[in-house]
Amino acid sequence: MQWQRWNRQAKLWLWVITLIGVVAALPLGAQRMAMEDSANTVEYAFDYRDIIEVAEHQAKPAEFVEEQLGLLKEAGVNTMAVYESSLKELSQAGRLTYYNEKDAALLQGKLPDDRVNYTYILFAGEEEEQKVGKVVREAMDRHGVPYRDWSFGERKGIVAEQSLTAMQLKTMDFDPMSLDAIRDAGFRILARFSDRVVPYDAARTDAQLSMLKEYGVTRLLFDGEKAKGASDQGQLKSLDSFGELLKQYDIGLTAIENLKKPQQGIHKLAYLTDYNVVRVYSLSPEDSIEMTPHGIADRFLLAAKDRNIRMFFLNSMLQSSMDTGKLNHSVDKIALAMGGPDGVIAKLEEAGFPAGEAQPFEYTNAKWEKPVRAVVALGAIALITLLVAAFLPAAAIPVFFLGLVGSAGLYVLNSSLMEQGLALGAAVAGPTLAMIWVMNRIYSRTVGDRRMVGGETWKVGGASYEGDAKTQWVFPSVSLGHRIGIALNWFVVGTLITLSAVPLVFGLLHNITYSLVLEQFRGVSVLFFGPLFLVAIYVFLYEGSDGHGVIRRAALILSRPITLLWVVGAIVVGAIGFYYISRSGNAGQVSSIELLFRNWLESTFGVRPRFKEFMLGHPPLLLGLFLSIRYRAAWVLIIVGTMGQLSMVSTFTHLHTPLYISIIRTLLGLGAGILIGLVCIGAWIVLEGAWRRWVQPHIRKPSA
């Protein structure tokens, strides 16, 4: 008895510790909001390779390239992305032509030499031979390919003693003539490095960065799954070397949005460059043709505002049409979509995102952050302990101390994993404890301490009520106004308990790596389903905070025969669960009607509340609270309503979304959800009144 009393008293102190952690997290949230507002300039980069590939199929390629660069510059596109070159790309750009052994023999009017299979390269002119020839020769020297000078007519060239297929695989340095053309056209240059040149050569990389710096390059975007230097990090410490060079030349990085996992090595390079990183969203070649200018503008605005995107990468493609007999491309379409008073760039500038050079967020690690985050971690441990104590009341004290020791040990091994684990635990605990508090209020207002599944007749307010199968399904009537007031009060208090987890989550994960999506909140599936599962267990198996008789109630439920009603209920629950899964995560599916509704909400409020909150979660919860005081069956709506509560916490686990956007989204969802819930309550009152007045009197009552 003494131990139980200590554990009950400990719960009060655990709530105090939780609230202290919540308050401690607020300055961290304010600091994050200041960081998110420190860089709003947006950069628009076009893939220069796409222009070259489209130009290859035009009647006058050079004129086409010049014309398209002018259109894009006039539209407001301010950057061109260039890649490390190859023989194919240099040929597409008109710098050279290449031949295999047979084609070279045909060109010279000779029979091919069957003993060799060399590659023959001819440069387009004197300038190409001097500038591009240096790039080609350097690549062959690096790969150990023997070569010699060669010419045909007035054109100079090279014979490489390797097959054309093998030569086409060689990665070469950036095309200096393309760099000159882009700079002369008034564009900034976004250099796209790969990790295909191995082993890593620090001296060569230093020379590359020095050359790019002369062209005004301030940012890199990696091509492929790896950052430059990632393959040789183990042996050559190449990432460390490359990171030092990037910092020496003050060149930042670009992280690609929507990758399944970050490019290998970029996390370390970001750290070495003091997180001089901006995030880029890429418009795919297919979308550049299929999407309307209005659709592109809406997508870009949403990305800049909701996901902190500060660079947009524009792709194009060539599309052939047998019906029209024409080659279609999307370069001019993109220029049309981007420019003008109603274009993408104008709309983003109106929303507070001016066009210019993308800048990294300004952040600082103040000395006070570390102890404050320790207090936040303590609050998360307390909240998780309260969740465990809701199901195991006698375990509060030992669980709390085990949490302290375990968290301290995990912090020593991997501090990031410790913070992510506590954040996930707090995120699950908040909405679960909120719904458990709600259920305890329902129990106290309805059946009191004598509630039991499959039990005998219950007494409430001195009256006896016999329910179906010894279970009371209808409770004494309470006035409508009182029921609505109680429901609103419980909804507000439960929501506040849920939201207590939010500062703990963003306080624990207060790091620029989460804003840049170099790290992410882990355990999304656990957050989606954990509270639902735990609340369902509490509704069906627990009678209150004491936790007695759980095993007996579980046995009674399992021993009951399976009826048609159970089967229908299982099908309904399965359908709801499937729909819930289909909507969850980044790959969630939505209907076309909902997309229209989403767009209307976005255009009306500027921030779109989450559908799972204001339609699927909050209204059922508010209606369930109203009905639960009168009808036992309505308790299942509390489980359904848990979706809205956990969704609010989930909103704040999108750490790349500006904090103020998440706050507005949650408040809009609460307001809309309460209004819809009140409408549902009003509809129920009308339907229930109609039933009692016109239907119930005509139902034949059984004879005595």
Image (spheres, rainbow, N blue to C red):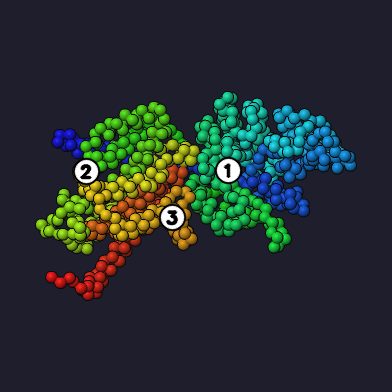
Quarter holding the C terminus is bottom left
* Residue sitting at x 48%, y 50%: 587
* Residue sitting at x 82%, y 33%: 115
Residue 199 placement, left or right of 113: left
Q: Earlier in the sequence, mark 3 or mark 1?
A: 1
Instruction: Give yes or no for contact between labels 3 and 2 (Cβ–Cβ under 8 Å).
Output: no
Residue 455 placement, left or right of 128: left
Around disc 3, counting alpha carbons within 10 Å, would you say few (fewer than 14), some (14 to 19), or many (20 or more)? Answer: many
Q: Which of marks 1 and 2 is nearer the N terminus?
A: 1
Q: Residue 547 carries which label?
A: 2
Quarter holding the N terminus is top left
Q: Nearer the viewer, residue 636 or 49?
A: 636
Q: What residue type is labelled 1?
A: Glu
Element type at mark 2: loop
Residue 544 placement, left or right of 683: left
Around disc 2, counting alpha carbons within 10 Å, would you say few (fewer than 14), some (14 to 19), or many (20 or more)? Answer: some
The residue identified by callout 1 is: 357
* Residue sitting at x 30%, y 66%: 683
Among all residues in the image, which is located at the extreme right? 109
| Measured Cα–Cα span from mark 3 to mark 1 | 28 Å
Q: Which of marks 3 and 2 is nearer the N terminus?
A: 2
Q: Nearer the viewer, residue 8 or 575?
A: 575
Q: Which amino acid does label 2 sit on?
A: Gly
Element type at mark 1: loop
Q: Nearer the viewer, mark 3 or mark 2?
A: 2
Q: Is residue 269 above or below residue 428?
A: above
Residue 142: image x %, image y %? Answer: 71, 29
The residue identified by callout 3 is: 608
Element type at mark 3: loop
Q: Which of 350 and 276 is in front in this view?
A: 276
* Residue sitting at x 52%, y 39%: 262
Among all residues in the image, which is located at the extreme top? 235
